[in-house]
Amino acid sequence: MKNTSLTKEQCKSKIFKLAIKLGCPPNLIATRLLSEEDKLDMIEGLMPDDCLEAHVRAWMDAGMPGYAHGSDIPYKSAPKKEFRSQTLEQEPQPLPLSAPFVPYVD
C-alpha cells in the first residue's frame, strides 16, 4: 500500500464521489461512519479506496448507524414536512383581478 498524504479537500472529494457512486448522502458518511481517527488515516493516506468503499457498503447494509459516535442504532431520516398548500383541504380561491392593462402603443 502506498502512503500518500491527502489534503482535507481531496478527502472530501473522495467521500463525495464514493457517496454519489453508492447513492448515499456524503455528509452522513463524514458524520455517522468516519471517526476523527478515520479521517486522520485518510489524510495520512493510510486508508485505501477499496477499503473505504467496503466499509461504506457494510455500514449502509447495517442501516447507516452512528458508528463515529459509538452508536449502533440505524439512521432514521427526518419526516418530510408538508407545505401549507398541501395541507389545505379547500379548493384554492382565484385571485381578484385588477383592471386590464392598457396596451402600449408606439
Image (cartoon, rainbow, N blue to C red):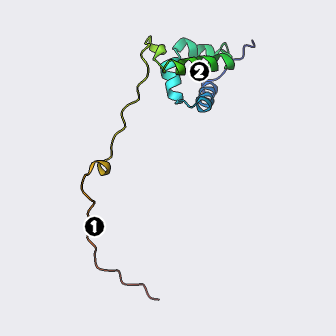
Label drawn at residue 25: none
Name which residue lies at 53% across and 22% down.
60
**Residue 96 vs residue 16: left or right?**
left
Disc 1 residue type (three-letter): Leu
Gap between marks 1 and 2 measured at Cα: 52 Å
Instruction: Report the quarter where the N terminus lies.
Output: top right
Disc 2 residue type (three-letter): Arg
| Mark 1 surroundings within 10 Å by alpha-carbon count, few (fewer than 14), some (14 through 19), many (20 or more) | few
Label drawn at residue 95: 1
Name which residue lies at 52% across and 30% down.
25
Q: 79 or 38: nearer the eye?
A: 79
**Which residue is disc 2 drawn over?**
57
Residue 88 appears in the figure: yes
| Mark 2 surroundings within 10 Å by alpha-carbon count, few (fewer than 14), some (14 through 19), many (20 or more) | some
Residue 32 placement (x, y as % from top left) = 48, 20
**Residue 67 vs residue 17: left or right?**
left
Q: 7 or 50: nearer the eye?
A: 50
Please identify the quarter of the rendering in which residue 39 is found: top right
Kind of element beneath mark 1 = loop
> Which of label 1 and label 2 is nearer to you?
2
Name which residue lies at 63% across and 18% down.
54
